[in-house]
Image (tube, helix red, strand yellow):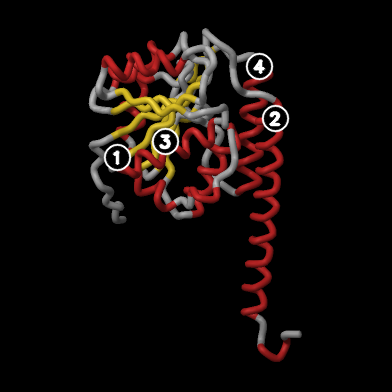
Amino acid sequence: MTTTQREPVTRVAVLIPTYNERDNLPGIVARVRASVPAADVFVLDDGSPDGTGQIADDLAAADPQVHVVHRTSKEGLGKAYLAGFAIVLERGYDAAVEMDADGSHQPEQLPSLLAALPRADVVIGARWVKGGEVRNWPARRKVLSVGANLYTKVLLGMSVNDATAGYRVYRSSALRTMGLQGVESQGYCFQIDLTLRAIRAGLTVVEVPITFVEREVGVSKMGRDIVREALTSVTRWGIEHRVGQLRSAVGKAREREPVGERS
C-alpha cells in the first residue's frame, strides 16, 4: 500500500480568536510560544470592550512572533477564523492552528497534533476517542457533546468521532481545497461544517487524543443559539446526504436494468 507524500510543514500560524479574554490571553500566548517556539501567533480580537486588544498589542510589541488582527465588532468564531485563514494563505504559512484563548486547549499538546501532519491534511485534537479526556465538565455537558457528535457522525456518515472539536491543525493546501468561500456557520457548527468539507474534498482527517480542560477564568461563549444552529444545520446536511445516497442508489439500479424493462 502506497503512502501519500505530503509537503513538510515548517511555517505554522496559531490562530487565537478573542472576545473579553484579557485575563487569559497573556498566559495562553506564553504557553504557545514555549511549546512551539518556531510558530507565529495571531490574536484575532473582535473588538473586546475589556481591553483584550490592547493587551494583545502589548504582547506583540514585546515579541515579533506575536501579531494582532483588530476586528471592529463581535462577529463570531467562524468569521474570525476565516479572516485568520486568509492571512495564513496570503503570507505563505504551511499550516494554521485553531486554538481557544481560555486555556481549554492546552498548548503543551500542540506538538502532538503537529506530529500527525505527515499523515494528515487535517488534524483534530479529539476528546471523544481512546486516550481523550475532558476535565471539569458537568455530566450534562458531557452527554450533550457526546450526543451531538454521535448524531453528527451517524447522520452525515462521517468516521470522525469529535467533529465539534475546536483544537485543530489545517494544512494550507487543505484550506485551499475545502471551498471556504461558502462558509457562513459559527461555533460548533463551523467546526462540523469544515470537517464535512474536508471529507467531501477527499482529504485525510486524523484525530489525536487530547485532554480538554474547562476554563477557570472568564465566561464561556457557548449559548443556546450556537447549539440551535448546529442542530438545524446538521439535520439539513444529513437529509441532503441521505437524499443524495438514495438518488445514487436508484441511478445505479436503473443502470443494471435491461434496456427493455426500463419505464
Give the Cα distance between marks 4 and 3.
Answer: 34 Å
Residue 118: where, in percent of width, then height?
Answer: 29, 42
Residue 175: where, in percent of width, then height?
Answer: 41, 46
Residue 90: where, in percent of width, then height?
Answer: 33, 44
Q: Mark on residue 225? A: 2
Give the Cα distance between marks 1 and 3.
Answer: 11 Å
Q: Amino acid at mark 4?
A: Ala
Point out the frontmost of discs 1 and 3.
Answer: 3
Q: Amino acid at mark 1?
A: Tyr
Q: Mark on residue 84? A: 3
| For marks 4 and 2 on the same chain, the one whose residue lies earlier in the sequence | 4
Label 4: how many Cα within 10 Å (few below 14, some 14–19, many 20+): few
At 68% across and 70% down in the image, what residue appears?
250
CB-based contact (under 8 Å), mark 3 and mark 2: no
Q: Mark on residue 93? A: 1
Element at label 1: loop
| For marks 4 and 1 on the same chain, the one whose residue lies earlier in the sequence | 1
